[in-house]
Amino acid sequence: MSLFYLISFLLFHPNYCATKKYTNYTLYRGVPVNKSHLDFFNSLSEMFDVNFWTPPGSLYKPIDFVLAPGDKKVFLKMAEEYDVYLSTLIADVQRAFDMQRVKSYIRRNLGSFDWNDFYRINDIYNWLKDLKDKYPEFVKVESIGTTYEKRPILAVHVTLPGSKLRSKVIVEGGIHAREWIGPCFVTYMLQQILDSPKSNNSNLKDIALTYEWFFVPVLNPDGYEYTHTNNRLWRKNRNNEYGVDLNRNFDHAFGTVGVSFSHYEETYCGAKAFSEKETIAMSNFVRNHSNHLEYYLAFHSYGQAMILPYANTRAHMENFDTVAAMAKQAADHIALRYNTRYVYGTAYDTVGYVTSGVSGCWVKETFSVPYVLTFELPDRGQYGFALPNEKITPTCIETMDGVLSLLKPRTKIYDKLRHEHRGFDDGQRTKFLDKLVILFNVCLFVIARFD
Ligand SMILES: [Zn+2]
């Protein structure tokens, strides 16, 4: 092949020269304070090549979006005419992405995987396999399905030795490809559970022994890898060139609100519920472990919110108040560490829009799972998806504080289960202690009376 053909091939062959760069693309934030502002932001995608990081919702909710260099001048002129509130969050998005360091994992050297760096999908998967080899008696790694690009979707099952099991926790990460901090946190949480026997955090130890754990760190491995190789802002899976938003494809109020039926939109929900290999795999996996499933936690970014079901309505349904009280406590725990502030409530309460086909909503409704939460991890838009490396560890530490607060066994729902496993439950233990205290007091009385 001559040099000319080689250059032409690299320039024009989509698979070899497809890395999209965002040099001089700018991340703006607009805050609509009246209906005409909201209409203006809603119409942006008709006029410009706009990429929403947080889409238009209700009044006063910030809208973050990226514009191409060629569109900025016209846009800024229009924004002035509409008199919208506008600020620049990141002047050059590519520069922010270039600061996100991606490290390689060295096989069979578990210490070379850390939470100071981001990793490609094969490195995350190799680390998971090495964990299984290191702890064969209590870590299982299985593929729960295969993606369009023939990658396995790996799930990790952990039951610690000496566990006094009462119920199950499923942790989902990486359903949206560009939200890199999600898989970081899920792998961190897995590591924390595995390290808990050596930890001096008695709360962590106790919680780690209380549940059977299931982690799916990267539910959308094709999309995740594509953000490393082709387009850092990819969100969907890789079904065809357009992809489907997997967190709009679950069979809960499918296709009703907050989705698009247009292939190339970011929130394209697919032709029907569970049309995608990844959502089919996850739904089967959850169904297989739905017996005594107590918690379903999903990790996204960004926005610092804990989102409670249901996403398709403004109503507070079922045990909303109970879970909201738990979320408040978790938010307080998170804030104690580095003063990171979370909001909590339904999608409408927190991010300002309703949506449908969401994984957690389907899990809660289908299997009556009591505690379902979707986390929008940090930040609030200073870096957005371009969260720098030095934020990974603090984010993981503070989020773990919040998660431990949520997972603290607290309900009577599972007392029966606990009774079966532990011989006697907390209620009986309390009664026993009460009797001991009475007996002690009687002895004291007798001694004092006849002294
Ligand atoms: Zn997301």
Image (cartoon, rainbow, N blue to C red):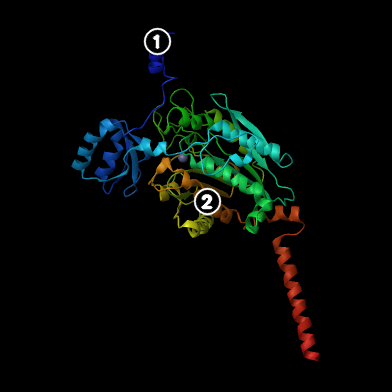
Q: Residues within 10 Å of mark 2 (few under 14, many from 20)?
A: many
Can you say whether 433 is above or below 96 in the image?
below
Q: Secondary structure at mark 1?
A: helix
Q: Secondary structure at mark 2?
A: helix
Whether label 2 lies within 8 Å of ligand 1 gets the answer no
Query: Which residue is tagged 2?
Result: 399
Mark 1: give few (<14), some (14-19) or many (20+) Cα within 10 Å: few
Identify the residue at the far front of this view: 3
Mark before the other along the chain sequence, 1 or 2:
1
State the residue in front, 99 or 202.
99
Image spot of residue 239 (x, y percent): 49, 25
Name which residue lies at 41% across and 51% down. Answer: 349
Q: Percent from the top left, x then y, of residue 130?
A: 66, 36
Mark 1 Cβ and ligand 1 under 8 Å apart: no
Residue found farthest to the right: 450
Residue 44 picture location, percent across and down: 29, 35
Assign the C terminus to one quadrant of the image: bottom right
At 66% across and 33% down in the image, what residue appears? 142
Q: Is residue 261 above or below residue 430?
A: above
Residue 244: image x %, image y %?
A: 46, 29
Label 2 sits on what residue type? Answer: Thr
Residue visible at 38% across and 16% down in the picture: 12
Q: In the figure, is residue 303 to the left or right of 368?
A: left
Q: Residue at x 63, y 31 (%)?
A: 143
| Residue under label 1 | 5
In the picture, the disc for residue 335 is none
Left or right: where 91 falls relative to 221: left
